[in-house]
Image: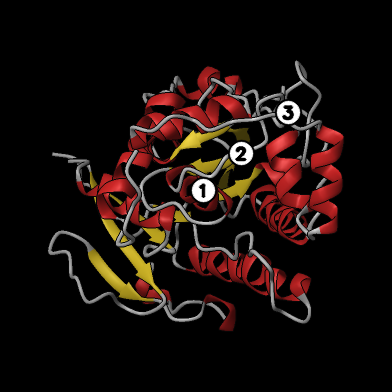
Amino acid sequence: MSRQQVVAVTGASGFVGSALVEALRKEPTVACRAFYRSLPQHRLDDVDQIEGGDLTKGPLPAEVLRGVDTVVHTAARTHVLRDPTHDPYAAYRRINVDGTMNVAKSAIAAGVKRFIFLSSIKVNGESTPIGRPFTDMDDPAPEDAYGLTKLEAERGLSDLAASGALTVRVLRSPLVYGPGVKGNLAQLLRLVDQGVPLPFASVRNSRSMIALQNLVSAIVASADPAVGGSATHLVSDQEDLSTVELIRALADGLHRGARLWSLPDSVLEFGARIAGRADQARRLLGSLTVDSSGLTRDLGWRPSVRPREGLAEMARHYAETSPVSRPAG
C-alpha cells in the first residue's frame, strides 16, 4: 500500500485555509498538517495541528515540515476596508512577500518538493473590457498594494522554481464567496437582507467570482502527486454574473425581492468618489472577467458549484446564522 501524501496548509484558520483543511480530511490518500498562528480551541483528531506563529519572523523550524510532500500557502494579508495602517504597502509586503518566502525557503530546507501559492487576479489588474477576460498569458498589471505584493511573492517563488529547488504552482483567484464571507460582499449581503433599495438596475457589467468549494477543489487538484511542473493558472467559476444578477442571487437565497432602481453610472461613480468609496464602486460598476480554461486543460479540473446556486447558499447560511434581528421579507 502506498503511503499517504502529506499536505501542509498555512493560514489554516482563514476563510480558504479552514475550508481546505476540511476538504483534505476527507481525502483518503492525504494526511493533513495544518498551521495556525495560534492553535484553535477546537482540535481535530485526524489533523496534525501546529502553532506556526508569525510567519514573517523568519523560517519555520525544519522539523515542522519534515515529511511534507506539498505545502499550500494560503496565509496572506488580504484587502482591508478602510486600512488604518500608516504604510499599507509595507504591511502587505511583510506578510505577503516576506512571509511567503520564509515558508518557501523552510519547505526547501525540509525537502518539500511542491509548493502551491494562492495568489490573486489583482496581479493581472482591476478591470477588463467586456468580452476580453484575463488569461494565463497576460502580462501582470497590479494597481494596489495587495496585487503588487502578490506579484512580488510570485516572482520570488518563480526564482526558486527556476533553480530547481521547488515545483511551484500558482492559482490566481478572483473574489471568493461562500458561507462566512467578509469584506465588500458581506456588506452587500447585509444591505440586500435589510431591504435597502440599491441603485444598480441599469448596470451592465460582467464579473468573475469563485465559490469557496470550487477554489478548494482546484487547490486539491493542483496538489495531486500526478501533476508535474511549475505553472501559473487563473481560476474561476467559469460563469460570469452582472452586479444585478449577483444581487438577485443573494435576494433569492434570503427569500426576498431584489430592490433595485436606476441611476446613471456616472452619477454613481461621482457619488462614490465623494464618499471615498471609489474602489467599491469600481467593483460594482465595472467588469473583471477571468478565463480559467488553462486550468481545465492542464488538470482536467472543472467547477462543481454554479455561481447563482453558490451565492444563494451563502445568503441562506447568513440568514440562518445572523444574530441580528432581520426584517420580514
Q: Using the rendered view, name the quadrant where residue 221 is placed.
A: top left
Which comes before the other along the chain, label 2 or label 3? 3
Between 181 and 256, the one nearer to me in the picture: 256
Per the model, the C-alpha gap separating discs 1 and 2 is 8 Å
Q: For the C terminus, give its image quadrant.
A: top left
- Mark number, residue 191: 1
Give the residue type that dot 2 points to.
Leu
Task: Give how far across and how far down residue 298 sits, in percent.
Answer: 53, 22
Label 1 crowd bin: few (<14), some (14–19), many (20+), radius 10 Å: some
> Which mark is in front, 1 or 3?
1
- Mark number, residue 134: 3
> Which mark is in front, 2 or 3?
2
Q: How many marks?
A: 3
Q: Is residue 304 above or below residue 319?
A: above
The residue that disc 2 covers is: 198
Per the model, the C-alpha gap separating discs 1 and 3 is 30 Å
